[in-house]
């Protein structure tokens, strides 16, 4: 027993320590609750229909969050915006030159992303606020509806119980209804009897307000009386409609016809005040503004009451019949608040129309012609906010209406096909000024939706830049087509080339080209945007490079016809040479700055023109483009002279060059004839070729003659026999050439003679003993590092004592040599 008692005491101690209670449950007490299974949950799962309610609750509770999130996504990311195809990088970067646009594209995409992010944040915030407010409103409305329902049930219950409590309730109710009907009839009769007198009083007050339109002292009184008379008319018409008597209804309509005229008169007054609110605030006529606001507010409340009653009548028809007395008052929505908002829009419409006319007449007047816009908003902010109900948020409402109209105004001008580029560019620069001014009035950019021009700045800039480039391409295309035509007609009598003030040959369209480029630069400068100018200058760089390539290809294709004997009788050969000279002169004119005469070349003038329009970063990058163009002009000019020399050998010297180093060579004076022809060409073109190209022309022809002379070892039948006086003949040829070189200016002549010194090791290769050939080759290779081994082989094979061992020894010596590369020599051209 002792252990059992000890255990019992231990259990009691534990129970006491854990605060368990052993008091008797009293269900009548508020501190005790039902005990037992299923007593701690607010529903009974064993009741019939529990399963349906349970699963319905689960499905609804599970889908509501997804539905809300889906709604938010749909509102935030409309499907129309998702269908816009993305810009492909491959379309933007089609050419290697487009890599220079990466920084501009990156900045443009960053601006677009920032604008989109801002819109998304603003839209998401607005939708969240709207959703939260809607959910709160639904919750409050549900509670209110439940309370009304409970109260109506109580009233209905009391009414039902009262009928059983009073024995003669039916009789009393009938008498009561009769009394009420009698009172209503008496009131209606009295109202109809006094209706005309009261209406005459209203018309008199309206007349007085017409005479004092600036103050309208009877405005509130007129509104009150008209409201009462309207209610009388509405009640009477409602009752007569129930009676279903068309005759009486027509009589009443005629009786109330004057009331409609009075209402129209009053509405004119209200409309006049609404359209003059800005002027009234500026004139400090606050009394009239406040009275106007009171009327609009009263009508707004009346419309809300009517809408609520109509809603109740639709949802609770059986209950509404039993409580029909609460429908006294206005029966229809009068819409004065909506008319007021429409008047705000009407205030701005004529001013926007005037602004449009001024803007189309002079694009620079946009900011000046829109001063009224910000003045009106500032007037509302300073003078009207305190005169209107706070719930209206009149400044925000006014700004939203004005902002929407500004958006529509600008977009309409942008989308108008008759709008000029000057107007478009002015609009592109407007959003920054607009949002800065609106910020001063207290409106952040993200609060003003939609964007005033739908974030189309980059698109408009790109379109304007593309428009200038389109005109640029059209001009260049026309000029190039004319140049092709002139080149094809070059054989006309007298030629079709021009000569400048110095007598140099020039093509006819170069001046027009650079004048056109200056005009397009002026068009880009009118935009006052560096990105436009930079894009146009980039396009000009590209077109100028393409033009250089096109000229070279056209001349090369035409020269190839003469080089391959495809032109009978050499028709057009002499004009082709003239065109090569004229083209070379054109290229020099593009880059020849004459500081002594204060005259700059076309390219330098072009650079000075565009540098002030672009950013310093772009100007630094454009310097490399200008240098590349300058090098291209110089290269094309040199190419034209080189091609001229090649044509001389291909046509004039075609029959004599194959004879060199053959047995016929010993008995001819071909070198003297070629030098004579050379002198004639120099004499003929010295006056029409740019002075800086004359010496280059002589050097190029001399070099070409040397290259052809050395390459003649490959002629069919070329052979140097020890028994033939080939050394004397070579000396004779060189003497003839050097005699001509001595007649040239020392700078040119000495340079050419130094180049022709290469004939000395050439002669040594031909004349030294076989054992000395490797050493002679080594000396030749050391002096001319780009000496071609294939040409050396051809020289050795032209010797009559050629042996394979000579060539092997030369190749072995070449493998042992460590040649230091230097500037290119004449031997690089001798293959």
Image (tube, rainbow, N blue to C red):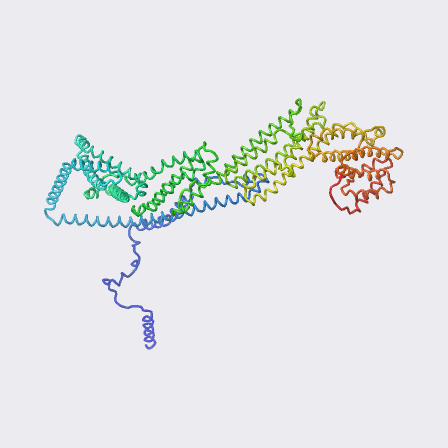
Where residue 103 appears, as percent x and y from the top left, is 54, 44
Work out whether 76 lies above or below 722. Answer: below
* Farthest bottom residue in view: 2
**Screen quadrant of the C terminus:** top right
Q: Position of residue 720 (x, y in %)?
A: 85, 34
The number of discs equals 0
* Residue 323 locus on image (x, y percent): 19, 44
Q: Quadrant of residue 514?
A: top right
Give the percent coordinates (x, y) of residue 482.
60, 27
Which is more toward the observer, 737 or 694? 694
Determine if residue 315 is in view.
Answer: no
In-image side of 156 versus 52 (left or right): left
Q: Quadrant of residue 15?
A: bottom left
Q: Nearer the viewer, residue 169 or 672?
A: 672
583 or 342, which is in the foreground? 583
Q: Who is closer to the viewer here, 83 or 234?
A: 234
Please indicate whether residue 563 sits to the left or right of residue 757 in the image.
left
Q: Residue farthest to the front?
A: 597
Q: Is residue 531 visible?
A: yes
Q: Quadrant of the N terminus?
A: bottom left
**Residue 274 placement, left or right of 87:** left
């Amino acid at each position: 027993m002792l252990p059992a008692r000890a255990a019992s005491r231990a259990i009691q101690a534990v129970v006491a320590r854990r605060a368990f209670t052993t008091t008797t449950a009293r269900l009548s007490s508020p501190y005790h609750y039902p005990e037992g299974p299923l007593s701690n949950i607010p529903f009974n799962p064993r009741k019939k229909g529990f399963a349906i309610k349970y699963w319905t609750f689960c499905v609804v509770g599970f889908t509501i969050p997804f539905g809300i999130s889906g709604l938010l996504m749909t509102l935030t990311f409309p499907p129309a915006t998702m269908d816009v195809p993305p810009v492909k990088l491959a379309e933007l970067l089609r050419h290697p030159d487009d890599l220079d646009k990466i920084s501009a594209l990156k900045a443009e995409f960053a601006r677009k992303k920032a604008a989109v992010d801002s819109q998304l944040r603003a839209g998401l915030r607005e939708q969240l606020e709207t959703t939260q407010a809607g959910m709160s409103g639904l919750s409050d409305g549900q509670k209110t509806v439940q309370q009304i329902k409970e109260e109506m049930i109580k009233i209905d219950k009391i009414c039902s119980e009262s009928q059983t409590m009073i024995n003669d309730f039916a009789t009393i109710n009938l008498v009561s209804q009769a009394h009420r009907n009698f009172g209503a009839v008496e009131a209606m009769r009295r109202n109809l009897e006094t209706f005309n007198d009261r209406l005459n009083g209203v018309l008199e007050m309206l007349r007085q307000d017409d005479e004092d339109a600036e103050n309208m002292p009877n405005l509130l009184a007129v509104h009150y009386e008209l409201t009462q008379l309207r209610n009388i008319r509405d009640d009477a018409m409602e009752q007569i409609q129930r009676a279903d008597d068309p005759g009486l209804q027509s009589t009443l309509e005629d009786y109330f016809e004057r009331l409609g005229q009075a209402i129209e008169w009053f509405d004119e007054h209200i409309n006049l005040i609404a359209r003059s609110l800005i002027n009234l605030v500026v004139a400090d006529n606050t009394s009239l503004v406040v009275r106007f606001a009171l009327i609009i507010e009263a009508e707004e409340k009346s419309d809300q009451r009517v809408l609520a009653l109509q809603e109740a009548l639709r949802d609770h028809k059986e209950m509404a019949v039993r409580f029909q007395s609460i429908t006294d008052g206005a029966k229809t929505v009068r819409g004065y608040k909506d008319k007021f908002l429409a008047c705000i829009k009407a205030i701005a419409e004529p001013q926007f129309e005037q602004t449009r006319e001024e803007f189309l007449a002079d694009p620079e007047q946009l900011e000046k012609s829109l001063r009224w816009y910000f003045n009106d908003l500032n007037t509302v902010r300073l003078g009207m906010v305190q005169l209107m109900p706070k719930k209206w948020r009149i400044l925000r409402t006014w700004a939203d209406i004005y902002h929407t109209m500004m958006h529509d105004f600008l977009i309409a001008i942008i989308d108008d096909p008759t709008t000029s580029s000057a107007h478009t560019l002015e609009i592109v620069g407007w959003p920054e000024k607009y949002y800065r001014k609106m910020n001063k009035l207290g409106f952040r950019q993200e609060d003003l939706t939609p964007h005033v021009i739908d974030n189309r700045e980059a698109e408009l800039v790109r379109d304007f830049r593309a428009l200038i480039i389109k005109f640029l391409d059209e001009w260049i295309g026309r000029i190039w087509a004319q140049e092709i035509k002139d080149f094809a007609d070059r054989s006309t009598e007298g030629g079709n080339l021009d000569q400048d003030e110095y007598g140099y040959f020039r093509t006819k369209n170069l001046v027009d080209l650079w004048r056109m480029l200056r005009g397009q630069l002026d068009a880009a400068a009118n935009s006052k945007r560096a990105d436009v100018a930079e894009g146009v200058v980039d396009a000009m760089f590209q077109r100028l490079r393409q033009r250089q390539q096109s000229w070279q290809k056209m001349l090369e294709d035409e020269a190839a016809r003469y080089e391959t004997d495809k032109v009978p009788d050499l028709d057009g050969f002499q004009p082709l040479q003239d065109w090569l000279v004229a083209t070379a002169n054109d290229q020099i004119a593009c880059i020849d700055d004459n500081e002594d005469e204060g005259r700059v070349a076309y390219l330098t003038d072009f650079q000075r023109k565009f540098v002030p329009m672009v950013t310093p970063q772009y100007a630094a990058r454009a310097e490399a483009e200008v240098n590349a163009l300058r090098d291209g002009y110089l290269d094309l000019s040199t190419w034209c002279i080189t091609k001229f020399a090649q044509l001389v050998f291909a046509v004039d010297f075609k029959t004599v060059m194959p004879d060199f180093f053959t047995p016929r060579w010993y008995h001819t004076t071909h070198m003297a004839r070629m030098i004579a022809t050379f002198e004639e060409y120099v004499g003929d073109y010295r006056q029409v070729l740019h002075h800086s190209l004359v010496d280059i022309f002589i050097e190029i022809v001399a070099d070409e003659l040397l290259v052809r002379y050395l390459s003649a070892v490959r002629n069919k039948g070329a052979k140097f026999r020890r028994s033939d006086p080939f050394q004397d003949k070579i000396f004779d040829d060189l003497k003839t050439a050097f005699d001509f070189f001595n007649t040239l200016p020392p700078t040119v002549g000495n340079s050419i003679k130094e180049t022709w010194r290469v004939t000395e090791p050439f002669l040594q290769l031909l004349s030294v003993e076989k054992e000395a050939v490797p050493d002679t080759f080594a000396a030749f290779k050391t002096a001319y590092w780009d000496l071609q081994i294939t040409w050396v082989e051809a020289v050795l094979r032209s010797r009559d004592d050629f042996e394979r061992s000579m060539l092997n020894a030369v190749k072995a010596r070449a493998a042992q040599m460590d040649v230091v590369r230097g500037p290119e020599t004449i031997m690089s051209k001798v293959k």
